[in-house]
Image: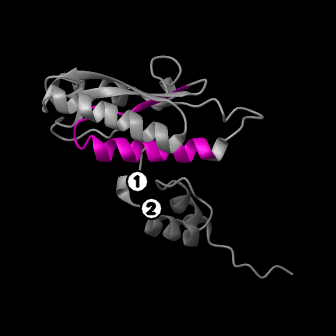
Amino acid sequence: MNTFIKPSQHALKTFSYQRCSISTSPIVYSWFVRLTNVTQVNTEAATPKHTRKRNYPLTYEQRQFPKLIGHTKTWNTFNTSNLRDGKRKAETVSDDLFLRQFIYGTWHSLFVSELIIKRRHNMIILSGLVIRTIHPRRMYFLIGYTEEILSALLKTPVKIEIQTVENKEEVIFTYW
């Protein structure tokens, strides 16, 4: 014995062609409309959204779409311990998070690009673009201080490779 009430044919025709990917019942449709936000439509992770005046600056790496990783874009962390039978998976991820927080705290607002972390054998190499707003003597001190502290904390040699730019506008590739 069927206890479900079937809607009329007219209600089904008008409902099935509405702008919703869920076309099963009016109850599900109303739930879908209430829970989805207009700003969430047509969004994609790691892809910047256009602004009205096209005044949002993007670097070359940010302008490349995530699907191009491995072709024209590369990963920000070179980590081979996540391969099958790799050692120190969780420790490597937590080390990378610690390195990023330490660098962005020590080199406060001096990095104009993202920090690239490379692991070669036992050595960790940090690289990025730094703005030339401080005296070179202070920059050399920061390089030495960072290398020594991180080497002592992580028990591996840490090397910093930086390039300097005059201002932040030199890094901007396009406006989005």
User: Which residue is painted at 55% across and 39% down in the image?
Assistant: 155
Quick check: 18 left or right of 91?
Answer: left
In this view of the protein, which residue sits in the foreground, 4 or 96? 96
| Residue 46 visible, this orientation | no
* Position of residue 51 measured from the top left corner of the image (x, y, whole percent): 22, 41
Q: Within the image, what quadrant is residue 147 found in?
A: top left
Residue 97, percent across and down?
A: 47, 46
Assess whether mark 1 and mark 2 are in contact (beta carbons under 8 angstroms). yes
Q: Which amino acid, by three-letter code, is at mark 2?
A: Thr
Horizontal side, residue 124 vs residue 130: left or right = right
Q: Which mark is residue 112?
A: none
Q: Identify the residue shown where x is 33% and y is 37%.
A: 145
Which residue is at the front of the view, 175 or 150?
A: 150
Residue for badge 1: 40
Q: Name the residue under label 2.
A: 36
Q: In which quarter of the image is residue 56?
A: top left
**76 vs 38: above or below:** above
- Which range of residues does the magenta coloring cover? 91-119
Judging depth in this view, the residue of 50 and 6 nearest the camera is 50
Residue type for callout 1: Gln
Disc 2, SS: loop
Q: Where is residue 93 in the image (x, y as percent from the top left)?
A: 56, 44
Q: Reply yes or no: does residue 5 show up in magenta.
A: no
Label 2 and label 1: CA atoms lie apart by 7 Å
Residue 118 colored in magenta in the image: yes
Look at the numbered disc 1 and give the secondary structure of its residue: helix
In this rendering, is residue 45 above or below 28? above
